[in-house]
Amino acid sequence: MKLTVPTMLTLLRIMLIPVLVLVFYLPYQWTNFAAAFIFAFASITDWLDGWIARRYNQFSAFGAFLDPVADKLMVAIALLLTVQKHPTVWMALWAAVIIGREIAVSALREWMAELGQRATVKVATIGKIKTIVQMVALVCLLYQEPLFGLNIFVIGEWLLAAAALLTLWSGFAYLRAAWPVLREDARS
């Protein structure tokens, strides 16, 4: 297996997960900034690996498999860290919605692939918007500190709520796209 630049960026994102956890729990004043920076950097590599893959035709089956796994792991860990530090009902609910949808859509994609219909559940625009809102929300929640007089944590909470709602919307869009194939398979 040849490692492409996009796949190396995806592997870097996975290797940043324990670094994020370690930095998050360090007992220093700068750790909020460092954790937010690590997550933001990982989010940028998510965009960058896709751009490089498309621009330079550096696709691989391993990269296509690994990229969504890396994204979901990074997001799930950031959500768990945030909920652990701020254990409110709303924070836990938004995290559960986001993580639950990611598991459900991954299972749906796997099932559709088994049926030879993977293209039916490809990433839609609403999913991309959800991802952007989610990433910005998590950067804000990890950072936590006021910035230029703005309560970044509260902004992050509202963005996470918006991301959870977009998560439900995009999950429904995936299910709606797959529904005709799923109904046909149930009849067979």
Image (cartoon, helix red, strand yellow):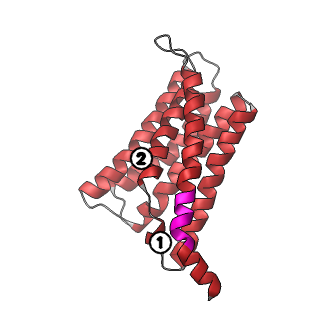
Q: From the viewer's side, name the closer residue of 30 and 84.
A: 84
- Determine the secondary structure under disc 1: helix
Q: Residues within 10 Å of mark 1 (few under 14, many from 20)?
A: some
Determine the CA span between mark 1 and mark 2: 21 Å
Q: Secondary structure at mark 2?
A: helix
Name the residue rendered at 49%, 56% in the picture.
68
List x then y, in percent, for residue 60.
Answer: 37, 65
Query: Closer to the camera, 93 or 85?
Result: 93
Three-letter residue code for mark 1? Arg
| Residue 85 on image: x %, y % | 70, 28
Query: Mark 2 sits on what residue?
Result: 46
> Does the magenta-highlighted stretch encompass residue 154?
no
Q: Specify few, some or many for label 2: CA neighbours under 10 Å numbering under 14, 14-19, or 20 or more.
A: some
x%, y% of residue 43? 44, 40
Residue in view at x 41 percent, y 52 percent: 125
6 and 170: which one is in front?
Answer: 170
Q: Amino acid at mark 2?
A: Asp
Characterize the magenta stretch by its predominant secondary structure.
helix
Residue 2 placement: quadrant: bottom left
Looking at the image, the residue that sits furthest to the bottom is 188
Highlighted range, magenta? 172-179
**Residue in front for this viewpoint, 23 or 40:** 40
- Quadrant of the rendered image containing residue 82: top right
Read off the residue under disc 1.
Answer: 118
Of the residues under marks 1 and 2, which one precedes in the sequence? Answer: 2
The quarter of the image holding the N terminus is: bottom left
